[in-house]
Amino acid sequence: MLGLIGTGITVAAVILGYVSVRNFVRTRLRFVDGVQRRWVPWATGFGAAVVASPVAAVLPLIGVGTALLFGVSVGVGVAHGARDIRRDSAGLLNP
């Protein structure tokens, strides 16, 4: 039962990280040229994983894998948000 709860927390963190970061990049960072650089998704994903690692170490239901997946979802969200800006499309996120 606890494994199922941990999996649910992981899925929720991944979805929330991706959707919120993609929307943030599309709306708030629309006119920032730095977000279009190729290394920005990697840096933000790494930073999110580093910030989430101490939280994952303290909480008993989630582990290091949750922090890594959260970092990956944040990086992918930044990349897709920047792509939406370049294409001037909303994708699946219609405001």
Image (cartoon, rainbow, N blue to C red):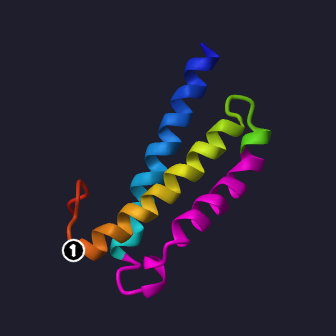
Residue at image location 79% in from the left, 40% down from the top: 58
Amino acid at the residue labelled 1 = Asp
Q: Residues within 10 Å of mark 1 (few under 14, many from 20)?
A: few
Give the quarter of the figure containing the C terminus: bottom left
Q: Position of residue 65 (x, y in %)?
A: 66, 37
Q: Viewer-proximal residue, 38 or 95? A: 38
Q: Viewer-proximal residue, 19 or 69? A: 69
Q: Viewer-proximal residue, 16 or 76? A: 76
Q: Position of residue 75 (x, y in %)?
A: 51, 59
What secondary structure is marked by label 1?
A: loop
Q: Is residue 89 left or right of residue 60?
A: left
Q: Is residue 56 left or right of residue 82?
A: right
Instruction: Give the total number of marks visible in the rendering.
Output: 1
Give the labeled residue for mark 1: 88
Residue 68 lies in quadrant: top right
**Chain part drawn in magenta:** 28-55
Residue at image location 43% in from the left, 86% down from the top: 33
Vertical arrangement, residue 23 with respect to residue 87, above or below: above
Magenta segment's dominant SS is helix
Residue 59 lies in quadrant: top right
Give the quarter of the figure containing the N terminus: top right
Magenta stretch: includes residue 87: no
Vertical arrangement, residue 34 with respect to residue 14, above or below: below
Magenta stretch: includes residue 35: yes
Residue at image location 61% in from the left, 67% down from the top: 43
